[in-house]
Amino acid sequence: MNGLTGVLTTIPATSGEKTRTKTRVDHRTSEEAILVRRVQAKDEMAFKEIVERYQSKVFSIIYGILRNHNDAEDIAQQVFAKIYFSIGNFDFRSSLLTWIYKITVNECYDYLRKKRVRKLVYESDFSEDDSTMMENSQTAMDHTVPVDETLEQRDLLLKLLSKISEEDRSLMLMKEVEGHSVEELAEMTGMNENTIKVKLFRTRQKLVKAAQRLGKGGSNPFAA
Amino acid sequence: MHEPVIERLEEYLDGNGPFPEVELHLSKCADCRQELAAMQAQTALMRRAFRSEAEPDAGFYARVMNRIETQAKPSVWSLFGESMFARRLAYASATFLVLMGVIFVSATEPDQPLAASDPQMILAGEQQYTPVSMDVSMDMERDREVVFTTLVTYQEYR
């Protein structure tokens, strides 16, 4: 997209709309920041409050990506352990939720990457005959069991999302999965609304192009 | 994708609108229509595929704390991790190893060639290889010669 930055940064607030350029939210003085400071000062009750406040959100993000309760439990525990050990480095540039969201999505992708590596190692242990046998049985299965197209597309989408940066991925999922508006995202991340729009647009373009590359004959596998 | 669509993209994908300027542009631009359709499909799939309302089982906080305790247990190696003491110990060990290395290298340097040419040493060495006999009928004459030679060499050397 040529000149996108120019397009979006020169757009004045449209008439009749609320002003686009808002004062940045100071994440250092919020009620959340006080809670974070208490955790940084090793207050376990404050940490408990953070866990209780965000456990549902974290768990549903993970479950949404992995679709497995046990895996979601394991990753959610790991996310909060990571929060506990690294909250000292939290710099209040974004909201606590944005930071937690980023950690959560990263943990999911780490898990998926490790799982893929494990699968590859496991498969490499098979002899050539075993592999051929498995491939044949897989082909046979493909003919008998109807393929769930949505699941296939979901896996493809996960794969495409793994190819973009952590920041773009979190932003896109926060917008589309968590349902935050551009305005909310700007408040949460400390970026201005136009930057958020540019980032989202570029991410969408990357995803569409990557999907077209993967699709047969350059067609878009997500096209209805 | 062109300006009128880009400007309103997020609102359009969220189903807000209508936006006459976007509709007008889309009616004339096939590229924008195609790209927007792909973005809409992807967005719909993302919303459908990843949204969930799952909850962890009861006692989640206790399980988190258990995991934290397990991960926080200091191993022997972690004691040498980041503390100032550990850093000082590492520097001291490195210095000690360097010093030991220098001492070892200087101690194993080859002997001075003068020592090897010292006649007294040569004779002493030869004497070492002379078989010692406890026999009383030892050749006294030969012994005397050896003593004499040693004395003469000693004097010459001095």
Image (spheres, rainbow, N blue to C red):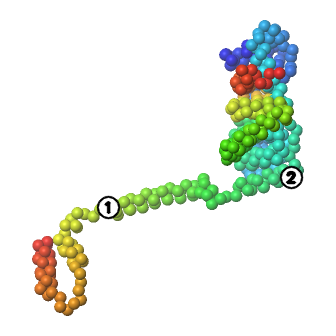
Q: B71 or A163: nearer the eye?
A: A163
Residue drawn 21% across and 65% down? B114
Q: A223 or A192: nearer the eye?
A: A223
> Which chain hosts label 2?
B
Give the vertical position of B115 relative to A207 (above or below): below
Find residue A223 and report its horizontal and vertical position in percent.
80, 22
Amino acid type indicated by mark 1: Glu
Which mark identifies residue B59? Answer: 2
Residue A57 visible in the shown view: no
Query: Where's the N terminus of chain B, which quadrant?
Result: top right
Residue drawn 77% across and 43% down? A34
Residue drawn 63% across and 60% down? B76
Classify 10 Å Cα crowding around label 2: few (below 14), some (14-19), many (20 and above). few
Which badge, 1 or 2, comes first in the chain's sequence?
A: 2
Dot 2: what SS?
loop
Which of the 4 image quarters holds residue A163? top right
Q: Residue furthest bottom?
A: B136
Residue drawn 77% across and 51% down? A43
Give the vertical position of A199 relative to B75 (above or below): above
Which of the 4 image quarters holds residue A150? top right
Find residue A201 and report its horizontal and vertical position in percent.
73, 22
Which mark identifies residue B109? Answer: 1
